[in-house]
């Protein structure tokens, strides 16, 4: 029970750090820049960069204070993320996982539009139009890396100690789902699924580069599809075709995750 309580406390600690940074952004930074509250208004991608960078910096301070108070020896903060190399074959596989999740996400989005559920599509449109496409792509690469350092490198790594790995993976999936709330419940469900993939892949590869590769491939390909019109053209697909896409991509993602998991056993 003590180990599970420690897992929960670690998640709450670093969530509190992120919430504090968001509050400081809303109270101090937003009145200066005038972009709107965090996650709304203008330049959402740049807002994310500011908040995530500050969260990592403040987390480093909290991390060092925590282990000094506990009088425990631990790794240097920057080493806990797991920046170990991955092979070219593994990199290609991670990219295919990211692309598969893009197709699944797009198919779900267009299926929802057929039933007049627009929250996921509306959020994607708002995010896409908040900055120029070049800025969007560059920031997608950078902010995805920062986001995964926060959620996987810091939160997950600190929470996973001395407990069966399934529970911290479930915990980080729920946290990732919770922060997707601006896109509605369907974006949260997709976020939870992606969080599970991140958790299992990270544990199986022991490298933050693996999940960053998935996240970057997903975000860049989704916005590229939007830019060239493929995403909008999917509105012309039948519901049956969209369901087939969701099922096929879902099966591929499930087997890819399980295959990586079995490899490390």
Image (cartoon, grey):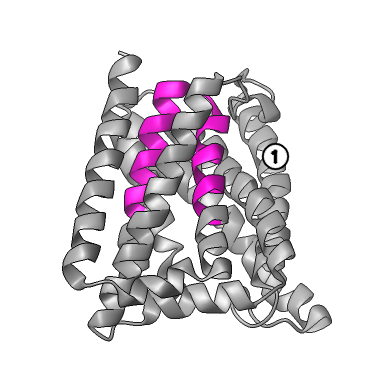
Secondary element at image label 1: helix
Residue at image coords 40%, 62%? 178
Measuring from the top left, give residue 104's x and y in whole percent.
33, 56
Relative to residue 185, is residue 209 drawn left or right? right
Task: Please say whether residue 212 is one of the residues in the magenta stretch.
Answer: yes
Main structural element of the magenta stretch: helix, strand or loop?
helix
Q: Which residues fall within the magenta stretch?
A: 192-219
Of residues 138 and 79, the one nearer the viewer is 138
Residue at image coords 30%, 60%? 189
Evaluate whether residue 1 shows in this view: no
Q: Which residue is mark 1?
A: 60
Which residue in the rendered view is the most extreme toward the top? 265
Measuring from the top left, give residue 231's x and y in whole percent.
44, 68
Measuring from the top left, give residue 202's x and y in whole percent.
45, 30
Evaluate whether residue 216 shows in this view: yes
Q: Is residue 100 above or below residue 129?
A: above
Relative to residue 48, is residue 123 drawn left or right? left
Question: Where, by quadrant of the figure, is residue 200 drawn?
Answer: top left
Residue at image coords 50%, 30%? 92
Relative to residue 147, is residue 240 drawn left or right? left
Measuring from the top left, give residue 6's x and y in whole percent.
41, 36
């Amino acid at each position: 029970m003590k180990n599970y309580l420690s897992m929960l406390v670690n998640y709450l600690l670093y969530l509190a750090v992120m919430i504090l940074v968001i509050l400081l952004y809303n109270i101090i930074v937003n009145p200066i820049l005038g972009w709107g509250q965090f996650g709304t208004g203008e330049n959402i991608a740049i807002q994310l960069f500011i908040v995530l960078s500050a969260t990592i910096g403040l987390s480093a301070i909290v991390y060092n204070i925590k282990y000094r108070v506990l009088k425990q020896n631990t790794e240097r903060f920057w080493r806990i993320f797991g920046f170990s190399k991955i092979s070219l074959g593994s990199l290609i596989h991670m990219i295919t996982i990211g692309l598969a999740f893009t197709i699944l996400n797009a198919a779900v989005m267009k299926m929802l539009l057929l039933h007049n559920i627009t929250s996921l599509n509306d959020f994607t449109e708002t995010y896409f139009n908040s900055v120029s496409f070049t800025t969007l792509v560059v920031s997608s690469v950078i902010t995805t890396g920062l986001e995964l350092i926060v959620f996987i490198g810091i939160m997950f790594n600190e929470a996973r100690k001395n407990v069966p790995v399934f529970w911290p993976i479930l915990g980080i999936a729920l946290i990732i789902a919770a922060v997707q709330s601006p896109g509605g419940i369907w974006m949260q469900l997709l976020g939870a699924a992606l969080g599970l993939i991140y958790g299992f892949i990270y544990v199986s590869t022991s490298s933050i580069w693996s999940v960053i590769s998935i996240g970057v491939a997903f975000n860049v390909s989704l916005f590229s599809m939007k830019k060239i019109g493929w995403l909008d053209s999917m509105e012309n697909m039948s519901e049956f075709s969209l369901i087939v896409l969701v099922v096929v991509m879902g099966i591929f993602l499930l087997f890819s995750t399980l295959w990586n998991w079995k490899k490390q056993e």
